[in-house]
Amino acid sequence: MKYSFSVASEREGTNAEKYVLRKELFGTDDILPVWVADMDIDTPQFVLDAVKKRIQHPNMGYEEVPSSAFMAQIEWMKKEHGVNFCLKDMFYSHSVVASMHTAIEAFTKEGEGVIVQTPVYPPFFHSVLKLNRKLVKNSLHVNEAGRYSFDIEDLKAKIDENTKLLLLCSPHNPVGRVWKKEELEEILALCLQHNIIVFADEIHADLVYKPNKHIPFASLSEAAKNITVTAIGVGKTFNMAGFAISSVAIPNKELRERFMKAYEKVHFAQGSSLSHVAFETAYKEGQKWLEALKKHLHVNYTMLESVAKKYPQFLKITPIEATYLAWIDCRGMGLRDKALRHFFIYEAKLGLNPGISFGREGSGFMRLNFALSSAKMLEVIKRLENALQRMELDKHKLGRI
């Protein structure tokens, strides 16, 4: 079957977060929102059809997550990513952030250290601070080409006897890295040496562009599997965040029991009848749709690359290996973070995530979600190019004064 992403359903008036919050976050409704990480691409029809079929049964009472749903995910992870989980390893969660909070509660005490590798998705450091743990900041290293890597020497210097947990973003949001096996093995060696547990947020695992390949942290070795809590799900892959269903895989029995104590305090329950059906269907029927989606997303990304190449004095696009989130180096504009945000809102009329929100290392950067239909992506490119052209003209005029 051929899938098309040329157009998508309009989301204004549907209570979509990225549209409803425009006024609150950007001060105006007159923008195209390209911030929060969900797609302006329709959720797959085969998922919606399965949900419609479930609705034919008139009872929507409590349900357990069916073992068939978890088994569909387990088979997907084995086939697509080469990692083996068992049914007993799996927990339901409504979100990765909730899972992260639970892991911090389960594996650390107040005042103990949690490693966060910035710039990174803001809940990583917000979660640590809200729970009164010590934030151990291990900033990523970036080279002249804009490629990020782990700073292992810095990490070695910051680990002490009170460092208990590492929050790993893999693939990385927002810098778009797919960590290579040898990079992850360096992290693993340190964690094993210092008895540090790893919470691996792998929610973007399926959104990897060739020739890159996602390596689940738990797949590195048996020792790795025994210290890893893996968060995975369908929300990003199939644009299903609204179903509020993800999962956590914990192969080690002792870690499972510790996680369960914190998990039961929250009362996660088991999600909704409709989310169970959607989750299972996505994993069973979604492979071909996903391949088509990734091709479309990469075309969108190359459009952004073209703009950056046209205006290299203003923009540099960080090389992307995964996710649909472009990490744009805007330091060439010569604007402070507040003015940079103002430029995108009022000149380009686009709502992006300011890079500074991902940590101080993100100063001068912006994050743009390019998971859009072809039609909407063309509009984003048009707005961005027009704004950059005006900036170039203004600078040229100033240069002649």
Image: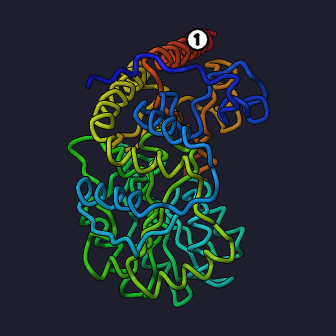
Vertical side of 65 occupied by 339: above or below: above
Residue drawn at x 36%, y 52% as measured from the top left: 205
Residue 220: image quadrant is bottom left
Vertical side of 71 occupied by 369: above or below: above
Q: Total of numbered circles in the picture?
A: 1
Residue 155 x/y as whole percent: 44, 73
Quarter of the figure that contains the N terminus: top left
Report the coloring of the rendering. rainbow
Vertical side of 296 occupied by 129: above or below: below
Give 319 or 265, whichever is nearer the viewer: 265
Packing grade of label 1 (10 A; few <14, some 14-19, many >=20) is few
Give 135 or 373, whichever is nearer the viewer: 373
Residue 292 x/y as whole percent: 30, 30
Q: Secondary structure at mark 1?
A: helix
Residue drawn at x 66%, y 61% as measured from the top left: 126
Q: Amino acid at mark 1?
A: Arg
Residue 252: image quadrant is bottom left
Q: On the image, numbered disc 1 is attached to which residue?
A: 390
Residue 385 x/y as whole percent: 50, 15
Residue 186 x/y as whole percent: 31, 73
Vertical side of 134 occupied by 61: above or below: above
Quarter of the figure that contains the C terminus: top right
Q: Which residue is situated farthest in the left direction here?
A: 211
Residue 196: image quadrant is bottom left
Residue drawn at x 58%, y 15% as measured from the top left: 387
Q: Which residue is situated farthest in the bottom direction here?
A: 161
Residue drawn at x 32%, y 47% as measured from the top left: 284
171 relative to 199 in the view: left or right: left
297 relative to 130 in the view: left or right: left
Give 386 or 154, whichever is nearer the viewer: 386
From where the camera sits, is residue 144 visible? Answer: no
